[in-house]
Image (cartoon, grey):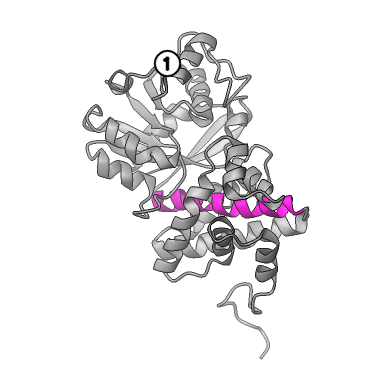
Amino acid sequence: MADVSIIGAGSWGTALSVVLSDNGHNVTIWSIADSEIEMLNKYHENKEKLPGVILPDDMVFTTDLKMACHKKDLIVLAVPSVYTRSTAVLMSSVVEKDQVIVNVSKGIEEDSLMTLSDIIKQEIPQARVAVMSGPSHAEEVGRRIPTTCVVGAGKKETAEYVQNIFISKVFRVYISPDVLGIELGGALKNVVALAAGMADGLGYGDNTKAALITRGIAEISRLGVKMGGSAETFAGLTGIGDLVVTCASQHSRNRKAGMLMGQGMNMEQAMKEVNMVVEGVYSAKAALALARKYDVEVPIIEKVNDILFKGDTVKSAVGELMNREKKEEYYGLLWKES
């Protein structure tokens, strides 16, 4: 049994609290918002973000960050990516030396182009930092639907420690040393999922969705490998696995926001309608900046940026993608006949 705190009371943090509680751990959930903690204390249910998932009576809910972090065996950082740095700054004075923090959010910081684990290491250098990602919608994890994820860390023993705390009959956890690949796959797939949603909003079909998924993972892999990630990671759970579920699922907020834009809404209107953080919008500029920094071609990601920030229409972007110059699918493959 471990004492675990979840920093962030959104849908994902709430869903993971169910996994941890089912495994017999003592769970504390922290939120900066008094209203969220009052709701959880009163109903033991996140009625706004994860309705229908009832939390155990012995779970603790608090706005006291020092209490939430003090002497905890594991801290799960589950705030939206845009709040990772500000939350890490708040945590820096209350996290003890060698405490393990596992980040479960997905994104890249727009200004610095840093991954979330690098932000945490910068702001909380005394901690041991891991990441966990994979095809894992909170709505299904909270209902105990079988799910698989990957934990990455610099040291194998840190990854195994987190794996042992989370793994269960319905939540299978793998481990990997490729922290960078895991984080890039998780962040960049949200941008491609916006494109998939836009195609759905236009009424396009399975052919279009399959094209976006396959060419999307090609872009993610090209950039990720150039930055130092492993090609195997992008072929696994946090690459193609997470991309498929985010592009296709009714639970995906990125797909939903994209679909609304495909139906005619602008970015601000779509985000307001979704009423949750749409990570792909925040990662899109960073993804394009990284591609330009590493000189990698990412036409889908580029067109998503044009739609989000330059006012291009979804239909015109599709036309431009379809009418790009002719190419081979994979360069470097040899032709058998000359």
Residue 245: in sight, yes or no?
no
Q: Residue at x 37, y 32 (%)?
A: 161
- In the rendered structure, the answer to whether residue 312 lies left or right of residue 40 reads right
The residue lying furthest to the bottom in this view is 338
Q: Position of residue 268 (x, y in %)?
A: 57, 45
Q: Position of residue 312 (x, y in %)?
A: 61, 62
* Quarter the C terminus occupies: bottom right
Dividing the picture into quadrants, the one containing residue 123 is top left
Per the image, the residue denoted by label 1 is 61
Q: Main secondary structure of the magenta part?
A: helix
Q: Residues within 10 Å of mark 1 (few under 14, many from 20)?
A: many
Residue 176: in sight, yes or no?
yes
SS type, badge 1: strand
Q: Is residue 165 above or below residue 86?
A: above
Q: Which residues are magenta?
A: 179-202
Q: Position of residue 103 (x, y in %)?
A: 40, 37
What amino acid is found at the position of numbered circle 1 in the picture? Answer: Phe
**Depth order, front residue of 148/157:** 148
Residue 14 colored in magenta in the image: no
**Depth order, front residue of 32/177:** 32
Residue 194 colored in magenta in the image: yes
* Quarter the N terminus occupies: top left
**Depth order, front residue of 218/40:** 40
Q: Residue at x 57, y 67 (%)?
A: 299
Q: Residue at x 50, y 15 (%)?
A: 39
- In the rendered structure, the answer to whether residue 229 lies left or right of residue 45 reads left
Q: Position of residue 182 (x, y in %)?
A: 46, 49
- In the rendered structure, the answer to whether residue 296 lies left or right of residue 251 reads left
Q: Give the number of marks.
A: 1
Q: Is residue 149 above or below residue 310?
A: above
